[in-house]
Amino acid sequence: DMALISRKGSALVREIHEKQKRDKSRQRFLELAGSKLGDILGVEKSVDEIDADIVVVGEDGEVDFKGKARFSQHLAVSAFTKSKTISQQRQNLPIFSVRDELLQVVRENQVVIIIGETGSGKTTQLTQYLYEYGYTVNGIIGCTQPRRVAAMSVAQRVSEEMETELGDKVGYAIRFEDATGPSTVIKYMTDGVLLRETLKDPVLEKYSIILMDEAHERSLDTDVLFGILKKVVARRRDFKLIVTSATLNGEKFSNFFGGVPIFHIPGRTFRVQICYSKTPCEDYVEAAVKQAMTIHIAGAPGDILIFLTGQDEIEATCYALSERMEQLISSTKQPVPKLLILPIYSQLPADLQAKIFQKAEDGARKCIVATNIAETSLTIDGIFYVIDTGYGKMKVYNPRMGMDALQVFPISRASADQRAGRAGRTGRTGPGTCYRLYTENAYENEMLQSPVPEIQRTNLGNVVLLLKSLKIQNLLDFDFMDPPPQDSILNSMYQLWLLGALNDVGDLTDLGRKMVKFPLDPPLAKLLLMGEQLECLSEVLTIVSMLSVPSVFFRPKDREAESDAAREKFFVPESDHLTLLNVYQQWKANEYRGDWCNDHFLQVKGLYKAREIRSQLLDILKTLKIPLTYCGPDWDVVRKTICSAYFHNAAMLKGIGEYVNCRNRMPCNLHPTSALYGSGYTPDYMVYHEAILTTKEYMQCVTAVEPHWLAELGPMLFSV
Ligand code: CDP
Ligand code: MG
């Protein structure tokens, strides 16, 4: 009973404990079992009982209950039948029909390319087949994902299928979070995590087989891995590599590895009816909301999936949808069917992400509002309608700003087809429908055939640093599937030289070698190491950790003024970085309390995450034997340290309250959330953490600096 409870309700029930407080808690648990567990397992409360020791962890991470309790046998029986249906589900996947052939090609070849439609079972099944076949005798199975959310949710799913705790036989690792253990044999991870592992272990000794999943996404890290794994394949006869893709670009991958076999998983193609807009659409958020409401009111049953570009739009859409639903309910006497509005984007907390996979109650319709994360990385069953706005966010190098920025772009035809393919996965006979909020002409004539690989459009600072430390001298010779533009490599090298990570002949410096040890962007790593030199490491460590989590300021829709006032209380007039430091230190002074965060409109989870990241970075500092130093209450030296790592992002005052970028003289604006915005304090110079491009170019997270610091710390760019 303990295994099945933890398998199914693992968000609620994490582990079984020996210790307990008996009677008082039992009532509480039975209530929980009845309401929450019952919900999850889809059973009613029953009277036949079994004793068990458990810990129940609520969605907020708090322990709800700890002790002995009774489970109903009914629950156990039902969970057992549930596990049967899981194996039935597994056997129903298209990949199951070719299981033996697949294992045979893998046995006979060192590298295999596997092509299969989204939802055919590549990500969840392949690893299990390999495990069942015995590939974990001399090493473990690694499976890389370009997206953190996918790595987590798929590991969760596979651990359920294998009836093991997440982190036991099946685990995952993403940056700053390792949910694997000594018995882990199937490890899902982001491609970035595996890339960093090659630094410590260039031939990936620990793995007997690596599955590079979602290769069609061509993420930056995947592309670099291609080159590195090709070498591992050449050096280790006992190592196998599987590359999977959801689109038909197998030839390219196959050729890269010298013409290896391509295996196609026979697809179940779902017919999808495509409806184009007649005219280009002015406001796709509004159009998407309208379309979703029309479907909900008049359409046949089936869930809706909307594709938008990012968190802000998704939140706005969810809000608009719930408002329209309220209006609808209050304006009609008729019963309105329920609409379950579920956002999904990469920064959404994991427990909320998991919600998209839950079945809606009878009569309710799910409406999932997603970024392109739901294009191929996550398979959500039951979708009958897709609303495709035709846009997505991409990280691109912006030469005008001299750095990467997330920008909204029209998607490619390949992405549009993937999006459409998400409709109709209901097991129903009729075709699903995809509403494209753009014209047929735009699809045919304006969209690119396939997306530009990330390596050809982003800053390569991290990649250069990594390849340099793998002793790859001439980066222009590295075996890239699609080499990045030479300018982009040279530009990244220049940036690293500015930071002092590379010397004049392009080799790693001592500083550069230390920077690689941190899973951080080069300027953040430099910030830490300069904290050591200028003796304010503890303070800087906190700032780096706070910059590594999404904004901790919480701004609920109906309490904007109140939350803004709460935020302003933390402001340090000359710096957003110091404001973050201030928040963290006050939180610490209040015993890291959750209720304190709530009172001050701070995201509890974000702060916890920052604290965890801080302790992980501290561990790395310890292994480098770098002692923690404190500067105390005078924070000027902290500003100076920030200047030393961010002088390449400097802006200077030009006109009243107007700033221009020091390097290219382009106007750049203070972000309205900044402590310096509208404060009346206008320093002559400031540095910023990053620039973001929306309607204007904004500086995100700024700190006032002294001009002579710029000259002292960035002499390659500034002089007195
Ligand atoms: O990787 P691929 O797109 O080929 O498929 P997959 O991710 O292995 O998904 C196969 C099936 O597993 C899906 O159709 C879902 O029914 C199920 N699945 C799930 O229920 N929950 C998840 N978190 C992931 C997959
Ligand atoms: Mg997959």
Image (cartoon, rainbow, N blue to C red):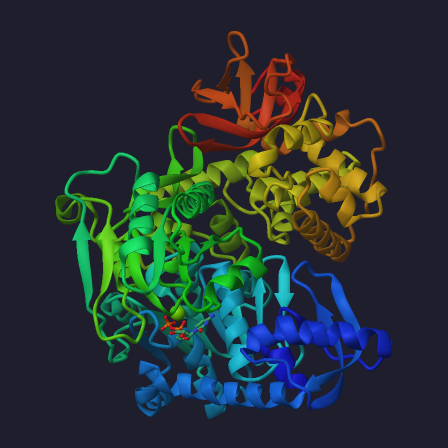
Does any portion of residue 504 appear in the rendered image? no
Residue in the foreground of this view, choosing between 34 and 383: 34
As drawn, 159 above or below 628: below
Residue displayed at 21% across by 48% down: 448
> In the rendered image, which quarter is residue 290 located in?
top left
Residue in the foreground of this view, choosing between 541 and 328: 328
Does any portion of residue 629 appear in the rendered image? yes
* Percent coordinates x, y for residue 163 in the rendering: 57, 84
> In the rendered image, which quarter is residue 713 located in?
top right
Q: Is residue 97 left or right of residue 189?
A: left
> In the rendered image, which quarter is residue 423 located in?
bottom left
Assign the C terminus to one quadrant of the image. Answer: top right
**Image region (quadrant) for ligand 2:** bottom left
Q: Is residue 42 left or right of residue 396?
A: right
**Most distant residue in the top direction:** 655
* Percent coordinates x, y for residue 666 in the rendering: 43, 20
Q: Is residue 445 left or right of residue 716?
A: left
* Percent coordinates x, y for residue 648 in the rendering: 54, 29
Residue displayed at 24% across by 77% down: 268
As drawn, 325 above or below 35: above
* Percent coordinates x, y for residue 133 in the rendering: 46, 92
Residue displayed at 21% across by 71% down: 430
Assign the N terminus to one quadrant of the image. Answer: bottom right
As drawn, 358 above or below 374: below
Residue displayed at 31% across by 54% down: 297
